[in-house]
């Protein structure tokens, strides 16, 4: 790497480390902007492209699915050919994909009336490849650049980039969707991406290591089929209701899990290196990230749909009420990261998950058709602080407790499990909500219909509460895993 690791007696960062951290923050910011900005645009995408929620939701799911499948393999590619090169390539691919996504409606209009939404989903897949390259290699670059006792602070600053990006995504999504139209939520990535590519190539220098490794194509194929079947089954339940066909798809996907494990055990260069799970701190941290993603990350999606659907707010108005939580989370992230370097991850990360649980209980007991918007602000602040406690501490726990030659693999596995959790969270949300109430009611709120009657709003809210209770149970598992991870000694040699 360009930067040398800081001396163990120094808690500061060198100029090279600061520049590398700035690039990583920019990459995280761009990825976060794209995640939250799309949430606000789903109702408009659904209406302007003449499609339905069951199809337009794949604008989110396709992106998450690609990232979940590719992160471990692209982390390995970074180990072999240079993490900086793959990270910078990810910026370029992501930026090109963003421009294509923005132009999908125009290109689709020239092909056929219904082509726009399918082109948008296809280009989101391409964009996801860039996102996977960024995510899979960023954690490994931090581990290369910073000493173990200083990584929590670095992850805290990256968390700041994520929260600023999420906040900007909410604000820009509201402004651009309201005043310019949904294509501009993707075009906004062009100037950010151009700056990021230039700055990344200039400051992140890695040597091509070209280790004697190969990609695990067989394992990746089984993982892809497993996730695809479960995702297709879940979304089909949301659109068609439960039946033998979609139940069989989900069952087939679940049955592929032991096949995947056996395949990985026999692979010379597996997609998931199960030897990493022999370390209790690493395994508990990775599993906590999975269940945290599974239990919480679609809550923002539900609240945005509630604000636009039940309360009839515009995307801009909905975004304003969500900003405070992201602001507070962003500014507390670096401090929480530094604190995790001193205390370890167990206490901070577990407390962070418990604060997310508090937020869910606020929604369960208080959310109705006339809930005070200030209560929603309070809930977002609590969850924002919880996020700032969990993410830097949990990520640094993984990277501080493995050897250097496994940084890329561990970073990829951590992101893969977190993204699979996020993907599953959206599937659970639309499936549980659609099973708890009639699908027409669920979809009328999800697409942002503004003329809902009181009865429809009340029926939908009962389905939303079923989602929140499910999420609370999953988050309780994440908190238990986090608490059982064990005590770290980051200042000692590994």
Image (cartoon, rainbow, N blue to C red):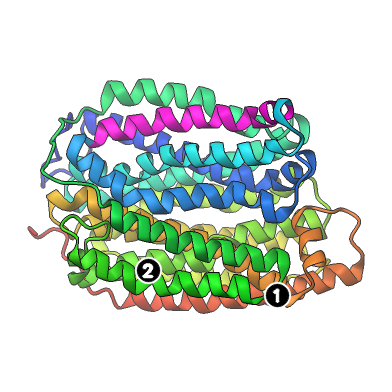
Residue 94 covered by magenta stretch: yes
Image quarter of residue 189: top right
Precedes in sequence: disc 2 or disc 1: 2
Check residue 118 in the rendering and tell me which mark sits there, or answer none.
Answer: none
Residue drawn at point x = 92 percent, y = 65 percent: 453
Q: Position of residue 407 (x, y in %)?
A: 20, 50
Check residue 435 in the rendering and tell me which mark sits there, or answer none.
Answer: 1
Q: Which quadrant of the rendered structure holds the C terminus?
A: bottom left
Answer above or below: position of 214 versus 205. Answer: below
Q: Which residue is mark 2?
A: 288
Gap between marks 2 and 1 measured at Cα: 27 Å
Residue stretch in magenta: 83-109
Magenta: main secondary structure equals helix
Residue 174 covered by magenta stretch: no
- Mark 2 vs 1: CB contact within 8 A: no
Seen in the image, is 145 located left or right of residue 337?
Answer: left
Within-10-Å neighbours for mark 2: few <14, some 14–19, many 20+ = many
Q: Nearer the viewer, residue 82 or 65?
A: 65
- Can you tell which of label 2 and label 1 is closer to the viewer? 1
Residue drawn at point x = 56 percent, y = 39 percent: 122
Helix or strand or loop: what does disc 2 sit on?
Answer: helix
């Amino acid at each position: 790497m360009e930067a040398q690791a800081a001396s163990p007696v120094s808690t500061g960062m060198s100029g090279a480390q600061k520049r590398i951290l700035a690039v990583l923050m920019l990459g995280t910011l761009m990825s976060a902007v794209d995640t939250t900005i799309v949430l606000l645009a789903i109702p408009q995408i659904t209406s302007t492209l003449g499609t339905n929620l069951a199809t337009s939701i794949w604008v989110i799911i396709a992106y998450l699915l690609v990232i979940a499948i590719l992160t471990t393999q692209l982390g390995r590619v970074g180990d072999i050919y240079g993490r900086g090169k793959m990270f910078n390539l990810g910026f370029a691919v992501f930026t090109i994909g963003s421009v294509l996504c923005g132009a999908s409606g125009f290109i689709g209009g020239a092909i056929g009336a219904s082509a726009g939404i399918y082109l948008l989903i296809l280009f989101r897949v391409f964009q996801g490849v860039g996102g996977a390259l960024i995510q899979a290699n960023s954690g490994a670059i931090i581990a290369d650049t910073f000493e173990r006792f200083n990584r929590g602070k670095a992850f805290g600053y990256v968390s700041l980039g994520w929260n600023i990006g999420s906040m900007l995504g909410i604000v820009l999504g509201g402004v651009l969707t309201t005043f310019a139209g949904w294509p501009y939520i993707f075009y906004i990535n062009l100037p950010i991406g151009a700056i990021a590519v230039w700055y990344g190539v200039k400051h992140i220098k890695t040597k091509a290591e070209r280790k004697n490794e190969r990609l695990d194509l067989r394992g990746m194929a089984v993982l892809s089929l497993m996730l695809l079947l479960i995702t297709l089954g879940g979304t089909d339940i949301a659109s068609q209701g439960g039946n033998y066909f979609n139940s069989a798809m989900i069952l087939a996907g679940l049955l592929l899990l032991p096949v995947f494990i056996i395949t990985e055990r026999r692979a010379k260069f597996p997609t998931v290196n199960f030897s990493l799970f022999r370390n209790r701190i690493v395994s508990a941290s990775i599993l906590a990230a999975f269940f945290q993603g599974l239990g919480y990350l679609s809550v923002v999606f539900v609240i945005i749909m509630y604000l636009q659907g039940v309360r009839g707010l515009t995307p801009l108005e909905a975004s304003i009420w969500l900003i405070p939580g992201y602001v507070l989370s962003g500014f507390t992230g670096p401090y929480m990261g530094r604190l995790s370097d001193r205390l370890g991850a167990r206490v901070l990360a577990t407390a962070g998950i418990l604060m997310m649980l508090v937020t869910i209980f606020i929604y369960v007991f208080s959310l109705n058709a006339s809930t005070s918007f200030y209560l929603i602000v309070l809930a977002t602040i609590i969850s924002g602080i919880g996020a700032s406690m969990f993410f830097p501490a949990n990520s640094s726990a993984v990277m501080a407790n493995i050897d250097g030659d496994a940084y890329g693999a561990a970073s990829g596995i951590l992101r893969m499990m977190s993204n699979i959790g996020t993907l599953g969270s959206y599937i659970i949300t639309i499936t549980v909500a659609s099973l708890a109430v009639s699908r027409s009611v669920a979809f009328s709120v999800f697409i942002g219909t503004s003329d809902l009657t009181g009865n429809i709003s009340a029926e939908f809210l009962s389905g939303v509460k079923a989602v929140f209770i499910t999420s609370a149970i999953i988050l309780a598992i994440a908190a238990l895993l986090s608490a059982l991870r064990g005590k770290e000694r980051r200042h000692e040699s590994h």
